[in-house]
Amino acid sequence: MSTTTPTRPEAPEPLAPAVGHRRGLPRFGGTAVFAAGLVLAALATLASGWSWGLFAVYGIVLGCLVTYVVSRAVEGRRKATDRLVTALVSSAFAIAMVPLVSLVYTVVSNGIGRLDGTFFSNSMVGVVGEGGGAYHAIMGTLIITALATLISVPVGLLAAIYLVEYGRGRLKKALTFFVDVMTGIPSIVAGLFAYALFAIFFGPGIRFGLGGAVALSVLMIPVVVRSSEEVLKLVPNELREASYALGVSKWRTILKVVVPTAIAGLGTSVTLAIARVIGETAPLLVIVGITAATNFDPFDGRMATLPVYAYYQLTQPGVPPEFGIGRAWTAALVLIIIVMALNVVARLISRFFAPKTGR
């Protein structure tokens, strides 16, 4: 009986490269090509007299053009179109960031000089030129904003719960319409409303912190309602139906299921609404006024707030004017820091109080 040794199969022949195959640009090739377009734009701008605005226009046009032409020659039409759109979107983002970065740089560079302990511990009593601080304005801002939050949050949350859980028919449409209208009213109108309201009871010329809180609440309530409404709509209906199937009443379902599920979004919406109104100047200028002394009582007398403080320090800086202007810039910087802190708090609330979906 003869035996044959099985033969090992031969390795397949390597495939020939596809006809018309195009190689792509390196990983950062698109950025390098766009940078080459910027170099050409700089040369063109220098030839016609340097201007940052002209350089931006030339840079976007030449950068996108060079990117498309090079990518079209190397990678083909589809990839070239993708790179062109990417360059346009990135250029638009860079243009949008220019005023933001310029604003932050200007405020920090002009306000950092007075960001010291004196600014946070002294008021403006008896100060004409150098020295003084914004302690009274910082405390006034915190007190008035806290009162506005106490007024706005219960009203806004309850209104949002009604619109999502109970609202039907024409009443819901009317409330939604008026909330949308209130979202876009000018802030000065809110100040005039608060002044007219309290002038009926206390007479003309009334100035106190509670009026400022009411004016800010007029601006804050529609923001809370609209954002909370969208958050409550994100709660799955299956959770509500499961609660109803267990015989739980509707109000207990809202209290024990819907609100805890949406608590992270609700906290974020409230925090962002506070950040929206804390820098308002016009309504506080009308109903609260300004004072150089510290006043902790929002029910009696004028109170200083950071936006109005910055406005008066800039428009009435005293002699010499550079000290008052410096205090105005520092007050603006403190406002930016407060708003940034509120946004960080909103992110933390969203992160730590969001429902845990992992097992």
Image (tube, grey):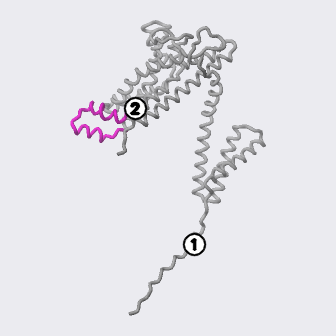
Q: Earlier in the sequence, mark 1 or mark 2?
A: 1
- Identify the residue shown where x is 61% and y is 43%: 91
- The overriding secondary structure of the stretch rendered in magenta is helix
How far is mark 1 from mark 2, CA to CA?
Answer: 61 Å
Magenta highlight on residue 184: no
For the record, the magenta segment spans 234-263
- Identify the residue shown where x is 70% and y is 14%: 320
Quadrant where the image shows the C terminus: top left
Above or below — where is 277 with respect to 130? below
Q: Is residue 90 left or right of residue 357?
A: right
Quadrant where the image shows the N terminus: bottom left
Picture coordinates of residue 134, whole percent (x, y): 57, 17
Picture coordinates of residue 66, whole percent (x, y): 67, 52
Give the residue at mark 2.
266
- Nearer to the camera, 309 or 163: 309
Q: Amino acid at mark 1?
A: Ala
Give the number of the disc on residue 16.
1
Q: Quadrant of residue 165?
A: top left
Q: Is residue 111 left or right of residue 284?
A: right
Above or below — where is 311 with respect to 70? above
Picture coordinates of residue 81, whole percent (x, y): 59, 53
Asked which secondary structure carries label 1, the reply is loop
Q: Is residue 321 left or right of residue 348?
A: right
- Nearer to the camera, 53 or 39: 39
- Identify the residue shown where x is 49% and y is 19%: 142
Magenta highlight on residue 243: yes
- Nearer to the camera, 10 or 171: 10
